[in-house]
Image: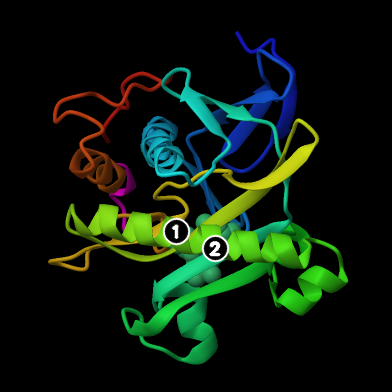
Amino acid sequence: MNRRRRVYEGKAKILYEGPEPGTLVQHFKDDATAFNAKKKDVIDGKGVLNNRICEFIFENLNAIGVPTHFVRRLNMREQLIREVEIVPLEVIVRNVAAGTLSERLGLDEGTQLPRSIIEFCYKNDELNDPLVSEEHITAFGWAAPQEIDDIMALAIRVNDFLSGLFLGVGIRLIDFKLEFGRLYENEMVRIVVADEISPDSCRLWDIGSDEKLDKDRFRRDLGGLLEAYTEVARRLGIMSENEPVATARGPVLVQ
Ligand code: CDP
């Protein structure tokens, strides 16, 4: 089936050549990785859920005028996207202290931040995606000052949209990661949201219980990752109550 040319394979996704020039197909795998792929597993059905959740979020962002690379979902695991030149930054938006911010600044996880904070990491697995400042970004030419401004403005809009969306379904948006790309179009170039937005790239806590509904379930060996992602999809009204998460592997023997 996959006779298409594979353009890139990452930890959780594969990019194939798209049906027309300037397009790609983004395929969501079931692979889960953490700590720069030092911890790995396969979680049947994760890719299907992330594809659907990402579709829902990107479609809504497109609809409110936040440009993304997303065109449309193609099937259970794949979406059609516009080809962009990825800016080599992981842009992290934080509302509440958690993860590496808590470690770095000695803040208890769950502490509300005085305001939303945007951080930049240089996208480089060999270096463990180090935190960098705007000075590094412009000095090394990873993005121009105007592009950093555009990225920050879009990141704030995405944060406001996602915070409200999740709040409405009883979920607190703690933090999330964005990637951006340069979209070349009729002699013009503009910054758009790329990659994915899913429970793999966000921290999502249930408002009543603080239960984690995101990839920390895998990072911290809490179990129940698929159930948590399904709950996010269900609350967003993406998947109906009884819709099975189809996987290519068939039933799994319970031991
Ligand atoms: O998640 P971790 O503790 O490694 O790092 P963080 O800087 O606290 O992550 C902040 C947010 O960005 C979390 O929602 C992570 O899931 C997300 N993130 C990501 O999706 N991919 C990365 N390479 C790093 C962070």
Number of other residues with Cα within 10 Å of mark 1, as a class: few under 14, some 14 to 19, many 20 or more: some
The kind of residue on which mark 1 rests is: Arg
Magenta stretch holds residue 195:
no
Q: What's the mark number on residue 153?
A: 2
Q: Residue furthest front?
A: 187
Q: Which residues are magenta?
A: 222-226
Q: Position of residue 43 (x, y in %)?
A: 41, 38
Q: Residue at x 64, y 69 (%)?
A: 120
Instruction: Pick the residue in front: 7 or 60.
Output: 60
As helix, strand or loop, the secondary structure at mark 2 comes to helix
Q: Residue at x 36, y 87 (%)?
A: 108
Q: Amino acid at mark 2?
A: Ala
Q: Residue furthest right?
A: 140
Q: Residue at x 12, y 66 (%)?
A: 208
In which quarter of the view is residue 1 placed? top right
Q: Is residue 89 left or right of residue 213?
A: right
Marker disc for residue 134: none
Q: Dot 1 corresponds to which residue?
A: 157
Determine contact: label 1, label 2, CB under 8 Å: yes
Q: Quadrant of the C terminus?
A: top left
Q: Is residue 129 above or below residue 213?
A: below
SS of the residue at dot 1? Answer: helix
Up/down of 207 relative to 47, above or below: below
